[in-house]
Image: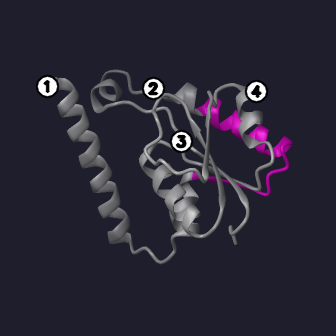
Amino acid sequence: MFDGKNILVTGGAGFVGSNLILRLLDIGANVRASLHKKNPVIKDDRIQYVWCDLRTSEDCMRVCNDMDYVFMCAANTSGAAVMASTPLVHVTPNITMNSQMLEATYFALVQENIPFSEIIEKYYPDLEIEDIKACVRYATDLTRSEEIHFEIA
């Protein structure tokens, strides 16, 4: 389905985005990935990385140009301490980013915009619920260890 297709993965330096990129490369997709604050974790000449701010319509239009599919993996996130003290801190940036991307994919005539919530269900149907839970636990453990390391440092 994605062999030879132009695919944008937003959040290309994140846990979900980077793993999705590896899968897409394996099946022959032409991958573009958006980056915002983090450097890429995958070094591969087949990936076109684009630094951008998905809260702006101009950057959204730029990264969506010439794409067949868009996987929306980007999100404005932070550690548990920030979320505990200011639980709504991510609402506005994420709503802005998602609405800008929906509009950009519409005007760029993208075949399909695939939100994060559908990625596992639609494109990894062979995964059992326990596999998904294990991935979430792994990602959570990584995040916690990074937070602990950061706080100690």
State how far apart marks 3 and 1 are (Cα): 27 Å
Image coordinates for residue 13, horizontal then vertical, percent: 47, 42
- Looking at the image, tell me whether mark 4 or mark 3 is earlier in sequence order: 3
Q: Which mark is residue 58?
A: 4
On the rendered image, what quadrant is the C terminus found in? top left
Image coordinates for residue 60, horizontal then vertical, percent: 71, 34
* Residue 118 against residue 51 in the figure, above or below: below
- In the rendered structure, are the residues bearing label 2 and label 3 in contact, judged by CB atoms less than 8 Å apart? no
State how far apart marks 2 and 1 are (Cα): 26 Å
Q: Residue furthest left?
A: 152
Q: SS at mark 4?
A: helix
- Looking at the image, tell me whether mark 2 or mark 3 is earlier in sequence order: 3
- In the rendered structure, are the residues bearing label 3 and label 1 in contact, judged by CB atoms less than 8 Å apart? no
Q: Which residues are magenta?
A: 95-115
Image coordinates for residue 145, horizontal then vertical, percent: 21, 40
Q: How many marks?
A: 4
Q: How is the image coloured?
A: one colour
Q: Is residue 27 magenta?
A: no
